Amino acid sequence: MKLLKIIAGTLLALIAGSYLFVKMHSVDDVPVEQLTAKWMYNTSTFVEVNGLPVHVSDEGTDNSNIPIILIHGTGASLHTWDGWVSELKNERRVIRFDLPGFGLTGPEPQNNYTIEQYTNYVVGILDNLGVSKAIIAGNSLGGYIAWATAIRYPNRVSKLVLVDASGYPYEAESVPIAFKLSQNKLAKLLLRNFIPKFVIRKSVENVYGTPSLVTNELVNRYYELTLREGNRAAIKERFIQTQPGNLRQFLPDLSVPTLILWGAKDKLIPLKIGKRFEKDIPNSTLIIFDELGHVPHEEAPQKTVLPVLEFLSEKH
């Protein structure tokens, strides 16, 4: 009897402790108005596309060169491209935006996170900004959106830059913990607003080749924009709806010059996927960065933007 009381007391203590821990790290959604002052740039605004105000930054030299549009990956925002933009804006017009479901843009009005709908947003932004044709670069999910846009709207894309892009089925070596929690039904039910900052840190470190490069400032950015009203609910739908699909069968039909950049230490989307893109896209070149991970453009922007600048200067 005494042993049973001890066990029961221990279980109650564990349950109470767990409840307090979850309660301490549960945070309500934050209205976008509370985030805009900190996370909008003087080059950014909200552009309405398909009934959704999309956070868009438009900057750089507006000359005869074709603009480049940069598309971030899951859990990120347009801020992930800061390092690249500092170099690219000296050469041409640079457009980047927060995808529906992420950053300051927030959830898609129809809860539509299919790859086709994402490509519609890309073209909608181009139309709104008066851009007839663009070079499209994207990382991870953004890379998937980039090449899918080239397939669905070939007349709007002149070149592609794919950075650790998704779109093929793959087996990850390691998945960021935040991604796991967002896809687990039980976790979503029990941990509705559970979002400790250490989970965000571990998730960002997971996609870096050198985790020690992840700063507090970087973690705070990811954390605060994750709290944007509607983003946590949207990411679950993103994972459900934006799966590898039939569009990849058209990759061999792509005729646009394509630069593929890949971090050899990518534990989420393995390098063999990058090699498959190179094999399947006729006019493509793969460049591998041995020491970098899944977001090489963010981890080492000055190094990874160099082949992009060279690629943009080439006449095809």
Image (cartoon, helix red, strand yellow):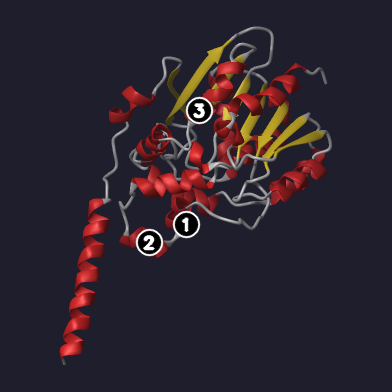
Gap in angstroms between the C-alphas marked 2 and 3? 30 Å
Mark 1: which secondary structure?
helix
Q: Is residue 2 above or below residue 245?
A: below
**Label 1 amino acid?**
Lys
Q: Tell me if residue 112 can be seen.
A: no
Name the residue: 44% across, 48% down. 202
Front one among 155 and 15? 15
Identify residue for label 1.
Answer: 180
Name the residue: 41% across, 15% down. 42
Q: Is residue 64 above or below residue 125?
A: above
Label at residue 97:
3
Identify residue for label 2.
Answer: 187
Viewer-nearest of labels 2 and 3? 2
Q: On the rendered structure, is 31 left or right of 92? A: left
Question: How many numbered discs?
Answer: 3
Q: On the rendered structure, is 34 left or right of 133? A: left
Quadrant for the N terminus in the image:
bottom left
In contact (CB < 8 Å): disc 2 and disc 1: yes
Residue lying at the far front in this picture: please name it.
212
Viewer-nearest of labels 1 and 3? 1
